Image (cartoon, rainbow, N blue to C red):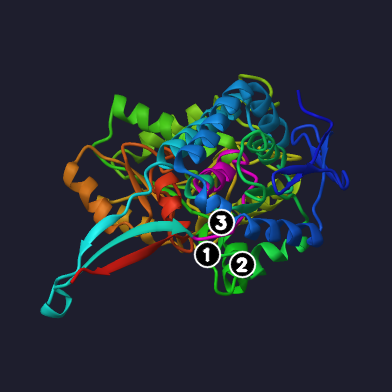
């Protein structure tokens, strides 16, 4: 179902200047398609066309923006298997997970279509003192202008959608750089947007080499940069971005807390949820479970059940519907994480299961007694590794969750309402998930992190707020 080659998109139109980028099957290593790469001149031209589209996009009626987004949602539904296959091949995502991501893509565009007609403002009383008695005011949101988006490899459809769909809803023209390892999904989004009646210049989808992406960050014609990816890259882009607004969705070191009241069937449920949270998509999620803090009273029982459940996971070809663990995005990433595991074991950590590697395939791996100064503990593993640690009480667990440079989301398994509320008060994260893993997300909720995990929020309504500015009207009435 995949095409042999894919164009890039400049100002809503496909262009095929070359077929320089080879996209590989991440499991077999075979080339599955070739993609056109944009050079700096093409990127600059696309930004110029986005600038020209500012007024037409701003003046496009809300119902027309809604119609374009609704069209995309329907077409993605029609092409669901093609999209899932592209994810399975270019990202190495197990087919069941690929289909789930396509359903989230549809949700994201559907929600954006609803929000496109909800860009509300307010009437604002100004007569707070005698000098303002004759004035009344109101404010509304207006599009910020041309936007620059850089999306990552791990959710190449839905994380691109979380930038593209709100931009269309808000009336912002944009240029998008998809990850070079996984560009096909974003190009299919471009192909679908090209079927709509959006003004020329409303969008450009531009795969390009990293060293050719300078303009996405530095071009002063762009008014907002939204980046999802690694913290090191994200903060460097912010430094170089100049006066433009910057939204960063960066890495995590996500933690789960299993409290002492989680026993019996509740413990079985927690085990199953943490298995999914830790090893879904081979752990390549910024909110994947990395650290698990378990109350000492139930530590041994949780550990044994968790290890047994993890050993039952099937690893292999992501096209097999029974596969749960597919390849990491590249052999080099698997080598990097395997080296971290080896370093931790040398320092005294104990491997409870997994710990072996074959090419880009890394076993689902569980360790305990990991030294907390090592990269495996304190950095983002971004792979199929979970680290277990006992805690004496709930307060210790909260302190240790916070003992991280990152703060994206945390998962808390407790039946105590007061403890749940205390976690919400005290945890230094963007989201606290009670009764489930930090990996849980619904696409309309505010999503983002604090500390090294980023700036700003995504989730359609919240992304629209980032992509718009408040404009006040004050009227002297007498």
Residue sitting at x 54%, y 58%:
379
Q: Which residues are magenta?
A: 144-167
Queried whether the magenta region covers residue 154, the answer comes back as yes
Q: Is residue 393 visible?
A: no
- Horizontal side of residue 429 vs 186, given as left or right: left
Q: Is residue 122 visible?
A: yes
Q: Earlier in the sequence, mark 2 or mark 3?
A: 3
Circle 2: element type? helix
Disc 3: which residue: 55
- Marks 2/1 in contact by CB < 8 Å: the verdict is yes
Residue sitting at x 31%, y 54%:
121
Callout 2: 10 Å neighbours few (<14), some, many (20+)? many
Q: Nearer the viewer, residue 274 or 19?
A: 19
Disc 1: which residue: 246
Residue sitting at x 60%, y 26%:
75
Circle 3: element type? helix
Q: Earlier in the sequence, mark 3 or mark 1?
A: 3
Q: Earlier in the sequence, mark 2 or mark 1?
A: 2
Circle 1: element type? strand
Report the disc number at residue 237.
2
Query: What's the CA distance linking mark 2 and mark 1?
Result: 9 Å
Q: Residue furthest left?
A: 130
């Amino acid at each position: 179902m995949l095409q042999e080659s894919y164009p890039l998109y400049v100002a809503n139109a496909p262009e095929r200047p070359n077929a320089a980028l080879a996209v590989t099957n991440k499991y077999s290593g075979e080339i599955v398609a070739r993609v056109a790469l944009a050079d700096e001149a093409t990127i600059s031209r696309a930004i110029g066309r986005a600038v020209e589209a500012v007024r037409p996009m701003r003046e496009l009626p809300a119902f027309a923006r809604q119609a374009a987004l609704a069209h995309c949602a329907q077409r993605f539904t029609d092409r669901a298997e093609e999209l899932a296959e592209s994810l399975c091949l270019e990202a190495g995502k197990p087919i069941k997970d690929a289909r789930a991501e396509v359903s989230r893509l549809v949700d994201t565009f559907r929600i954006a279509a609803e929000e496109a007609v909800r860009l509300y403002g307010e009437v604002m009383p100004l007569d707070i003192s005698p000098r303002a008695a004759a004035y009344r005011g109101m404010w509304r949101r207006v599009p910020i202008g041309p936007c620059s988006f850089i999306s990552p490899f791990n959710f190449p459809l839905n994380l691109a959608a979380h930038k593209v769909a709100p931009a269309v809803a808000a009336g912002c023209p944009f240029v998008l750089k998809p990850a070079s390892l996984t560009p096909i999904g974003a190009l299919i989004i471009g192909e679908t947007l090209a079927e709509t009646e959006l003004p020329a210049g409303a969008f450009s989808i531009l795969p390009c080499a990293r060293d050719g992406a300078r303009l996405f960050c530095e071009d002063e014609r762009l008014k907002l940069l939204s980046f999802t990816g690694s913290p090191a890259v994200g903060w460097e882009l912010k430094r170089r971005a100049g006066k433009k607004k910057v939204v960063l969705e960066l890495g995590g070191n996500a933690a789960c807390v299993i409290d002492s009241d989680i026993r019996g069937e509740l413990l079985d449920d927690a085990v199953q949820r943490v298995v999914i949270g830790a090893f879904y998509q081979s752990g390549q999620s910024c909110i994947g479970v990395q650290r698990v803090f378990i109350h000492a009273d139930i530590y041994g029982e949780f550990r044994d059940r968790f290890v047994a459940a993890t050993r039952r996971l099937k690893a292999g070809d992501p096209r097999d519907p029974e596969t749960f663990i597919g390849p990491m995005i590249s052999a080099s990433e698997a080598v990097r994480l395997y080296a971290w595991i080896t370093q931790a074991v040398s320092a005294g950590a104990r491997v409870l299961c997994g710990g072996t590697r074959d090419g880009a395939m890394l076993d689902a791996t569980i360790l305990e007694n990991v030294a907390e100064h090592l990269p495996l503990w304190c950095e983002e593993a971004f792979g199929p590794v979970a680290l277990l640690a006992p805690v004496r009480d709930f307060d210790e667990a909260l302190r240790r969750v916070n003992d991280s440079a990152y703060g994206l989301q945390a998962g808390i398994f407790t039946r105590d309402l007061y403890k749940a509320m205390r976690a919400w008060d005290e945890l230094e994260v963007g989201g606290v998930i009670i009764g489930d893993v930090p990996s849980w997300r619904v696409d309309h909720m505010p999503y983002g992190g604090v500390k090294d995990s980023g700036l700003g929020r995504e989730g359609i309504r919240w992304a629209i707020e980032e992509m718009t500015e408040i404009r006040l009207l004050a009227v002297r009435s007498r």
